[in-house]
Image (cartoon, rainbow, N blue to C red):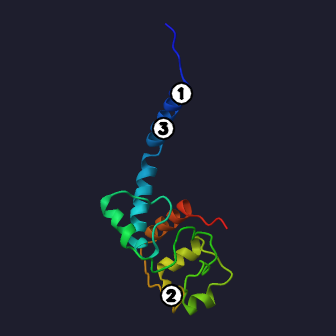
Amino acid sequence: MSVSITKATLRAALAGALIVGWVNLGGSALADDEAARELYLKTCSKCHGRVAGDVSLRPEDLLVYVVTMPLGPPLRNVYGRPAGSFGTYPYSEAMKEIATGWKWDEEALDLWFTSSQDMIRGSTMFLKMKKAEERKTIIDYLKKYAPYEG
């Protein structure tokens, strides 16, 4: 009996092996990604919209796409982006004065998330995140799913 293996069969077998390996090796990483996504959605997305990697087709999330009007600049590609530089977004005068010459890196984002008003008094954002691990989770999420490539 001879066995004939087609390219389609090989592709399907390879895809299956990759998926099984990805799920088996990255189980906790997938859970971490989901937790980071959920934290970002809860904390940031209502004002800043979504970033790459957080697309959801759950019915409760689909409504967000339809009714959410971002109040702040998008955080997609914010990590590494020069501060106060998103296109035509109408930044506050305080942000315009202070946000020159630095980028949104880990340190800047952590300070901002700790207290946006302590970092730039007079900015239009009012955020205080007390938990360092939550700040780090969101920063890592922004780094991973939406790095600045400019």
Does 20 appear above or below 43? Answer: above
Task: Please give the name of the residue rendered at 47% of the width and 67% of the height, measured from the top-left corner.
Answer: 138
Q: Report whether 111 appears left or right of 57.
A: right
Does 26 appear above or below 39? Answer: above
Q: Report whether 57 appears left or right of 82.
A: left
Q: Nearer the viewer, mark 1 or mark 3?
A: 1
Q: Nearer the viewer, mark 3 or mark 2?
A: 3
Place of residue 23 in the rendered image (x, y in percent of width and height, measured from the top left): 44, 42
| Helix, strand or loop status at disc 3 | helix
Place of residue 31 in the rendered image (x, y in percent of width and height, measured from the top left): 40, 53
* In-front residue for pair 10/102: 10
* In-front residue for pair 40/26: 40
Mark 2 and mark 1: Cα distance apart in space? 58 Å
The amino acid beneath tag 1 is Leu
| Helix, strand or loop status at disc 1 | helix
Does 76 appear above or below 6? Answer: below
> On the image, numbered disc 2 is attached to which residue?
118
Disc 2: CA contacts within 10 A as few (<14), some (14-19) or many (>=20)? some
Does 103 appear above or below 52? Answer: below
Q: Report whether 80 appears left or right of 110.
A: right
* In-front residue for pair 150/137: 150
Residue at the far top: name it.
1
- Residue 10, which numbered label? 1
| Helix, strand or loop status at disc 2 | helix
Disc 3: CA contacts within 10 A as few (<14), some (14-19) or many (>=20)? few
The amino acid beneath tag 3 is Gly
- Residue 21, which numbered label? 3
